[in-house]
Amino acid sequence: MTLLKMEEITKVFPGVRANDRVSFDLKEGEIHALVGENGAGKTTLMKILYGLQKPDSGSIYLKEQAATIRNPRDAINQGIGMVHQHFMLVPPFTVLENIVLGMETHTTGVLRMEGPAEAVQKIMDQNGLVVDLDAHVEDLPVGLQQRVEILKILYRGAEILVFDEPTAVLTPREVDELFKTFRMMTGQGRGIVFISHKLDEVLEIADRITVIRRGQVVRTLERSEATKPLIAELMVGKPVLLKVDKPEASPGEAILEVRDLRQTGERGHPTLDGVSLRVRAGEIYGIAGVEGNGQSELVQAITEPVKLDGGEILLGGDSILGWDVRTRRDAGIGHIPEDRQRYGLLLPFSLADNLVLGQHHRPPFVRGRQLIDSGRIRGYARETIESYDIRTPSEMTPANALSGGNQQKVIVAREMRFEPRLLVASQPTRGVDIGATEFIYSELIAARQGGKAVLLISADLDEVLSLSDRIGVMFKGRIIKEFAQSEATREQVGLYMTGEEQNG
Amino acid sequence: MAKLKLDKYRALEVLAPILGFLASLVVLLIIAAAVGETPGRTVSAIIRFTVGTGARLATVFSVAIPLFIAGLAVAVAFRAGVFNIGAEGQYFIGGLVGALAGIYLPLPRAIHLPVVVLAAMAGGALWAAIPAILKVTKGIHEVISTIMFNNIALALVNYLVNGPLSGRGEKSLEPQTYKILATALFGKLNAAFRFVGLNVPEHVYMDYSLIVAIIMGFLVWFLLFRMRFGFEIRAVGVSLDVSRYSGIRVKQVQIGVFLISGALAGLVGLQEIFAIRGHYTFEIASGLGFDGIAIALIGRNSPVGVIFSAILFAFLKQAGYGLQLYTSVPNAIIYLITGLMILFIVVINEIVTRYIRALRKKEAA
């Protein structure tokens, strides 16, 4: 029987089609992997399934019956359970308390734990999931915490289990355990949606594999026909038609030099494992890689002071490791952040204020060190809005009134106008429309023509390939391969991204 | 065209507190009716004691002075997202330090007056400094530490006034310090008001603390909206992440704003200590620091807004006395009404803010 069928699901956010007529189904006893880059639309699809987002069109069938899922409660009641990447547990509560939370058994308000304890025990026995019910969740290792999450949704009677990158936080042994559990659960007729971008794991466990890219299903493969290079190619996709006209590069001296950067993450594994790279004046250095391989950590280390185990970062020959953000900015590091809503803009502030943010402490925007020259700031803002074609009623409009694409233009315009020596552009076109994307591309190229060093980090391989003069592939905290643009092909870079080719 | 629209938004923003005030007034009248007072009697009692005569009205403004300073102190910290709940303690300590400068420093009047003001500010800032440092170095939340410091301040002041700093030989029923030197006492501005045609009766305190309040109000406005440090205060209040990303030294801003807030809180007691009593005592009005929190909230943490909300609070305080005196409505009802009003205003503010955001989005699209 087909447990779940999602048909022609479309979801449009301002400026981006997150899901474009996506169809997906899950059979009884099946593990169906959903793979694709971050931002491809996997999460949106699952949020729709779980009632966290409303689709613009399309329909959902559960056990061949049309279903409406308005909120997570609906989803749970209809047998859908989700294990999120970030656990939804109350750390000081015991395992049992976490499992029953939200559906406690009680007699006129007094909690009854014996009944649920028995029921949970039974579920544990059936699925080979052993946890001490009286242990406090905060004392458990991550693998066991995940087990609690699984028990939680099984206790709620889930038949469709969605796992959002469940192995990202696990050790190899814990992954083996998890996969055993997967097998036991599907053996009882449950279905599992396994979201991942680790291809080895997908090939090991999945019965079918659906590849999703730019909001569309590229293809659904049977396990027997799936190979790693094939999935990689499907994920990376055919070239899109965003033409980038770029004159010859004439790189100068090295502006940014990263040497053997090492960092240990929260869970004790290396996030940066000896990254080295150089970005020269007048070139765009692109970092390709599946997200979560140290790109964000690398950007952080360049733009702000963070804890490192070793290595060196030089800007124009000076070590910047001890510098705070302001000193780095003053020294000429511009930064287009990955998450613009969270880091890039003071949303209730006017565009004018946002356009000088980061340089607001320096002449010409202040006089005599402290006095803000608001006339000059507004004039500068009007100029910037004009020359970067930012669509806004006025320079005094608050940033939160603008569309996503225009907000991103504000950030790009701001960082460009500060004339940095090094521009770090992190996912610069994520979630923006085609028009804004083209604008951002031309700005990055203009920066390069202006003799700036540009470090581009993007999950979109086409973007990296068409903009960059040199490309470094990042895998497990290291640059495992560098290409000149002329020698980089989509397929080859894709293979390095998935770790298939190592140090070749 | 754009100008006109901005004004429309501003009008909407001003509307919120007025609606909240009216709504809470309705609740008051219902409660009064429940204890057998007609709306007419209730309203007339309020009016007689607040705006009925020039003297009453002047009293409302006089009462509003320390409330304004308290609101200003809290508001400036709120602007940076720093929840200084400790204005109460900072005000007790600041007042004491100011009083000591007034008692023990023999100075000519022209110097003595600014010195006691600065001493009060220094005292308040000092009391704010410890929670500020605990916050940025140890991550101890300022709400917890400042509440604790309020209690410590009260105990400390109580001990000092009863013990080492008690003015032995002063004839009084309550423990107090020696009298403040005449050179440091705050005179009244009633004559100045008369000069511009406003008759403020002698028993109403329109004293130098009004000048201090006006200067401080202007300085805070100037800091927040004309100075780089104020820009950073507001940025930190909107988003720590964006502020860090843009290079703002967040910890410095937090410490700085905490000290400014404490310094302002140190001035809350000026009127009572230097104009009304002429000495320091543990018995100075308590609770003003907490009123400041509500005043800042209703005034939307803006210096101009705080002027109006301080006057509103003073009005309510006086209205409470009026109700107690002329009706059978208990004075405590005024606290209830104040609380309700804050609730109404906050809710209506939120609705209006969302409405304005939606309008703006439409306009930008």
Image: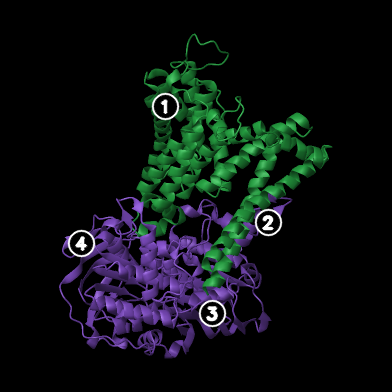
Q: Amino acid at mark 4?
A: Glu
Residue at position x 34%, y 80% in the image: A441
The x, y position of residue A79, in whole percent, is 63, 72
Query: Which residue is label 2 attached to?
Result: A105
Mark 4 lies on a secondary structure that is strand
Check chain identity for marks 4 and 2: say if they share one. yes
Disc 2 vs disc 1: Cβ atoms closer than 8 Å? Answer: no
Q: Is residue B78 left or right of residue A276?
A: right
Amino acid carrying mark 3 in the image? Val
The answer to whether residue B249 of the structure is visible from this angle is no
Q: Would you say the residues marked 4 and 2 are in contact, meaning their CB atoms lie under 8 Å apart?
A: no
- A459 on left or right of B283: left
Q: Which residue is mark 4?
A: A312
- Label 2's element? loop
Q: In the rendered image, which residue does mark 3 sit on? A: A12
Subunit that carries the residue with mark 4? A
- Chain painted in purple in the figure: A
Q: Mark 2 vs mark 1: give the one in front.
A: 1
Count of numbered marks? 4
